[in-house]
Image (spheres, coloured by chain):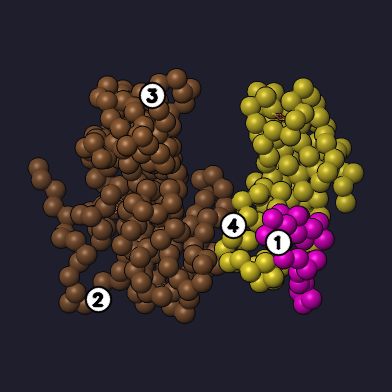
Amino acid sequence: MENKINLTINGKEVTGRPGMTILEVARDNGIDIPTLCYIQDLPPIGACRLCVVEVEGSRTLVGSCHTPVAEGMAIQTHSPKVIATRKVLVELMLASHPDACLICDKANICELRRIAADLEIGLPRFRTRKHYFPVEDENTDMVRDMSKCVQCRRCVIACKSKGDEPLFGMAYRGFDSKVIHGYDQPLGSEACEDCDACIDICPSGALRKPRRAGEERAAKALIIKG
Amino acid sequence: MAGKGVITPQKDRSDLIVRLQEAQQRYGYVPEEVIRALADSLNIPVHEVYGVASFYSFLSTRPLGRNVIRVCKSLPCYLKSAEMIMEAVQKELGIGLGETTPDGRFTFQLTNCIGLCDHAPAMLINQDTHVDLTPEKIKQILKSYQ
Ligand code: SF4
Ligand code: SF4
Ligand code: FES
Ligand code: FES
């Protein structure tokens, strides 16, 4: 039992083992830190920054999903500064996101919506243009709607296509950044294994199964309680 | 565009940027064929090569004009009225941002700080620097590029 690391999270003394991340130790102790790009058991991506926490003595907030715990760390997971930062991050994601929840196939299983609701994000504060990319449905088993992509890169990490290289990657820069396939071309059916790994793991409506006549929706129709 | 292949055969993906720069210099942009050939020879996906080529603003995946104007848009230049310079360029050439003149002579782009803030506002035309710009100077400067 020597290999224990002692630290505090929100004032509570907790222990972790070497190599564990702050997020893992927090979740082990029932503390919920929101994440968007993190996928359990896969290498951390560190793209969304939603998992930031305050570490005493650190000049900046740190991403808990990829920062290992260290002896004596004092961590705040829900301080006002942390909450404010998470809110702005989600507000920025929503600012360029289509206002399409009402007709979105994944509305009821959308992690982006859930996180926005959890963080009590209200009416939009930031005015920017919306992302618009044509919907890609060349692949018979996948619809890619990059207007709804939050660039978490989960699909890049999760892709299990033949060979060791994923079928997706990032291209362009800044506001124009986009997850692409090949020479920014629609993903056809030849390369893809139809394993659905990326569709299942996409937190938004950006990747989904096509809906065929008579088939049920992936999730129940969106019901808004008044 | 027949014959545009890999510039120098190589096996190491760390060479990628250098190869892309070579193509940029030779063709004035990085043609799709070069991107696909590079991906082949490096044994990496096309999206990775295209991703790098489309990320860097000094690499272009589309043909550019013979002369590329890059007006600095960073704060010091902005405070010294870089916007008037941008306007002057657009008016002189009759093209908008990111466009190329129909005769292929100029492409107009913006850039982040190019380290000439002490002589703001500044711009690059190809590899040449032009500093302490005023809208009046633009016409004269552009004349010297054919
Ligand atoms: S992806 Fe989520 S947030 Fe976006 S339109 Fe669909 S339900 Fe709404
Ligand atoms: S398509 Fe989905 S999984 Fe892939 S980066 Fe966009 S939001 Fe994330
Ligand atoms: S969950 Fe940590 S950066 Fe996205
Ligand atoms: S801000 Fe324009 S050169 Fe530095």
The quarter holding residue B81 reads top right
* Residue at figure coordinates x 29%, y 36% from the top left: A26
Mark 3 to mark 4: distance in Å?
A: 41 Å
The quarter holding residue B25 reads bottom right
Whether the residue carrying mark 3 lies under 8 Å from ligand 3 is answered with no
Residue under pointer 1: B12
Q: Earlier in the sequence, mark 1 or mark 4?
A: 1
* Residue at figure coordinates x 67%, y 48% from the top left: B57
Same chain? Circles 2 and 1: no
Mark 3 to mark 1: distance in Å?
A: 43 Å
Name the element at disc 2.
loop
State which region is magenta: B1-26
Residue B71 is covered by the magenta coloring: no
Q: Amino acid at mark 1?
A: Asp
Locate the N terminus of chain A and report the quarter of the image it occupies: top left
Q: Amino acid at mark 3?
A: Gly
Same chain? Circles 4 and 2: no
- Check the rendered structure and report the hue given to chain A: brown
Asked if the residue under mark 4 is in contact with the one under mark 1, i.e. CB atoms within 8 Å, the reply is no
In the image, taking residue A75 as reference, residue A28 lies left or right, namely left
Determine the residue located farthest toward the right in the rendered image.
Answer: B144
Residue under pointer 3: A72
Q: Amino acid at mark 4?
A: Gly
Residue under pointer 4: B51
Residue B141, position as x, y percentages in the image: 85, 38
Please give the chain letter of the residue carrying mark 2: A
Residue A188, position as x, y percentages in the image: 46, 75
Classify mark 4: residues with Cα within 10 Å, few (<14), some (14-19) or many (20+): many
Q: Which chain appears yellow?
A: B
Q: Is residue B139 above or below residue B99?
A: above
